[in-house]
Image (cartoon, rainbow, N blue to C red):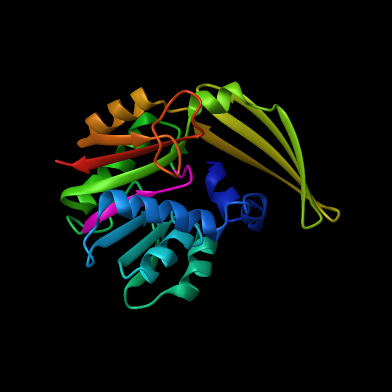
């Protein structure tokens, strides 16, 4: 069976080079606004689902929270491990599987780190696993792109040069997914990657939450937590375990 696209792409250093515009200041701004809205207890245990290299986890831990970051990418977790301490831990872990039962007060899934799987069952398994890991009334935050905005503003072709590395990106919409075919020229070394993310709408998330035992309590359209509308770039959802 061929390797899933996300295992290859997220283990690649090029993923982080391409998306490095999302800096630590953005992360801190969003986390501060979330904490103001959610008001987690000082001793809250937080799960960072698909934590990448751990920038959100590290900042949350610097604010005094006990944080566990999980990611499928061995390279990401190896990098994040340099920041680990008694109250900041990182694990290579598939979000579709339960890490701990009834343990976390809050789970975060940020920067469109969902919608990667082939089937609805896999996405439901991921949400169900997170729900099982939450304490009663524990909350889940998902930060997703606004699919309507993405489709309306899709650029079929894009070229970027970052650190002398050329990225040629071809984008299309197929089978309710936005698909990027990424060709990379790294000073004469060539490689290709694929990125596929489901175009989930607010209505889709409502259904997924209901099926997985979560209840949507609020949603927003940007990192300032302004109201969501068709022109919003983000879809930020807050749900809780019953």
User: Is residue 20 at least partly visible in the picture?
Assistant: yes
How far across and how far down the image is residue 55, in percent? 48, 62
- Toward which corner of the image does residue 210 lie, by quadrant? top left
Q: Is residue 94 visible?
A: no
**Residue at the location (52% across, 53% down)?**
26
Which residue is at the front of the view, 201 or 227? 227
The x and y percentages for residue 205 are: 34, 30
Q: How many marks?
A: 0
What is the magenta segment's predominant secondary structure?
Answer: strand
Assign the C terminus to one quadrant of the image: top left
Q: Which residues are magenta?
A: 104-113
**Residue at the (62%, 55%) spot, across then down:** 16
102 in magenta: no
Q: In which quadrant of the rendered view does residue 102 lie?
A: bottom left
Residue 39 picture location, percent across and down: 25, 55
Q: Residue furthest right?
A: 188
> Residue at horizontal 21%, vertical 52%?
134
Q: Does 105 appear in magenta?
A: yes
Q: Residue furthest bottom?
A: 86
Q: Is residue 130 above or below residue 73?
A: above
Front-most of residues 200 and 30: 30
Residue 104 image position (x, y, % from top left) = 23, 57
Residue 158 lies left or right of residue 222; in this view the side is right
Q: Is residue 57 above or below residue 86?
A: above
83 vs 218: above or below: below
Residue at 41%, 25% in the rendered image: 201
């Amino acid at each position: 069976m061929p390797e899933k696209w996300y295992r290859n792409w997220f283990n690649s250093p090029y993923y982080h080079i391409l998306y490095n515009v999302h800096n630590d200041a953005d992360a801190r701004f969003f986390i501060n606004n979330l904490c103001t809205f959610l008001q987690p207890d000082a001793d809250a245990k937080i799960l960072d689902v698909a934590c990448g290299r751990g920038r959100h986890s590290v900042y949350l831990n610097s604010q005094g929270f006990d944080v566990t970051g999980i990611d499928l990418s061995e390279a990401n977790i190896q990098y994040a491990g340099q920041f680990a301490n008694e109250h900041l831990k990182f694990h290579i872990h598939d979000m579709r599987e339960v890490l701990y039962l009834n343990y976390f007060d809050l789970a975060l899934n940020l920067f469109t780190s969902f919608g990667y799987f082939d089937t609805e069952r896999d996405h439901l398994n991921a949400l169900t696993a997170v729900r099982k890991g939450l304490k009663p009334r524990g909350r889940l935050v998902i930060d997703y792109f606004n699919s309507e905005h993405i489709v309306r503003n899709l650029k079929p072709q894009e070229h970027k040069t970052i650190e002398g590395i050329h990225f040629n990106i071809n984008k299309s919409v197929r089978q309710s997914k936005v698909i990027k075919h990424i060709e990379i020229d790294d000073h004469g070394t060539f490689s290709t990657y694929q990125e596929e993310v489901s175009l989930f709408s607010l209505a889709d998330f409502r259904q997924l939450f209901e099926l997985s035992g979560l209840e949507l309590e609020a949603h927003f359209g940007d990192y300032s937590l302004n109201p969501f509308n068709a022109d919003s770039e983000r879809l930020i959802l807050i749900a809780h375990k019953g």
